[in-house]
Image: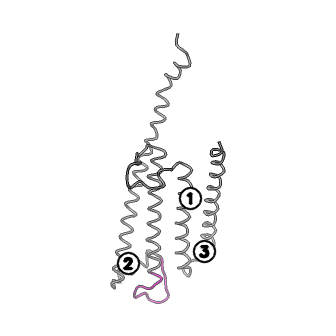
Amino acid sequence: MSDPTTSQAVSLRPLPNLIFASRWLQLPLYLGLIAAQAVYVFHFWVELVHLLEAAFGSETALQALVTSIGYKSEAQIASLNETIIMLVVLALIDVVMISNLLIMVIVGGYETFVSRMNLESHPDQPEWLSHVNASVLKVKLATAIIGISSIHLLKTFINAANYDVKVLMWQTIIHAVFLLSALAIALTDRLMAQPTAHH
């Protein structure tokens, strides 16, 4: 006579398999993020080409840069100045940091929640991927968001004359909230990891 517990486990096996296989539904989401990454790469090169053209005296490229960074001046902008160059470079750095964030979400999320990539023997395996888990990924994403917020805040302060005081105040407050949230996440993960390490 068969054990009812064993027969019940065998009859339920397809359901857990279906639930576990549902993780592959996330694959289109990661493919969509790869497409978003491609859009960021295209945007980066468009801005960089405009910067190079403006450096060689193109007024059309200069106006495109001024419009994209939201820079305003009482005097007519006839050529590149240090402020415009700085704002454009910060915008390019911002794109790179967001792109790094996308890579962390795509690679780390796929490795953690969908399937192993088996990159242990690959020479280009990211250092952080060797010990990535949901907690590590969460802290790294929070740190990346703080970096992106810092760039945005710096861009705002450089171009502060074109922003209202309330905008400056709220951007600073939001950045501080991001910082406190990241510290809280890191502290929580450390407190949760201590009993495990102790054990």
Query: Residue placed farthest to the top in the image?
Result: 1
Q: Residues within 10 Å of mark 2 (few under 14, many from 20)?
A: many
Task: List x then y, in percent, for residue 175.
Answer: 60, 67
Provide the residue span drawn in magenta. 70-84
Q: Residue 55 vs residue 114: left or right? A: left
Q: Which mark is residue 51?
A: 2
Q: Which label was assigned to residue 133?
A: none
* Disc 2 to disc 3: CB gap under 8 Å: no
Q: Residue at x 36, y 76 (%)?
A: 50
Q: Give the amino acid at mark 3.
A: Leu
State the separation of the CA atoms marked 2 and 3. 27 Å
> What amino acid is found at the position of numbered circle 1 in the picture?
Ala
Quadrant of residue 80 within the rendered picture: bottom left
Q: Secondary structure at mark 2?
A: helix
Membership of 71 in magenta stretch: yes
Of the numbered discs in the image, which one, if any, rests on residue 168?
Answer: 3
Foreground disc of the pair 1, 3: 1
Label 1, residues with CA under 10 Å away: few <14, some 14-19, many ≥20: many
Mark 2 belongs to which amino acid?
A: Leu
Give the residue at mark 1.
142
Is 187 placed above or below 27 here? below
Answer with mark 2 or mark 3, whichever residue precedes in sequence.
Answer: 2
Q: Considering depth in this image, is 199 or 46 the residue closer to the camera? A: 199
C-alpha distance separating marks 1 and 3: 22 Å
Task: Return the disc, 1 or 2, that comes first in the chain's sequence.
Answer: 2
In screen coordinates, is 172 left or right of 62? right
Upstream in sequence: badge 1 or badge 3: 1
Q: Could you tell me which secondary element the residue under label 3 belongs to?
A: helix
Is 175 or 188 nearer to us in this picture? 188
Q: Which is closer to the viewer, label 1 or label 2?
A: 1
Main secondary structure of the magenta stretch: loop
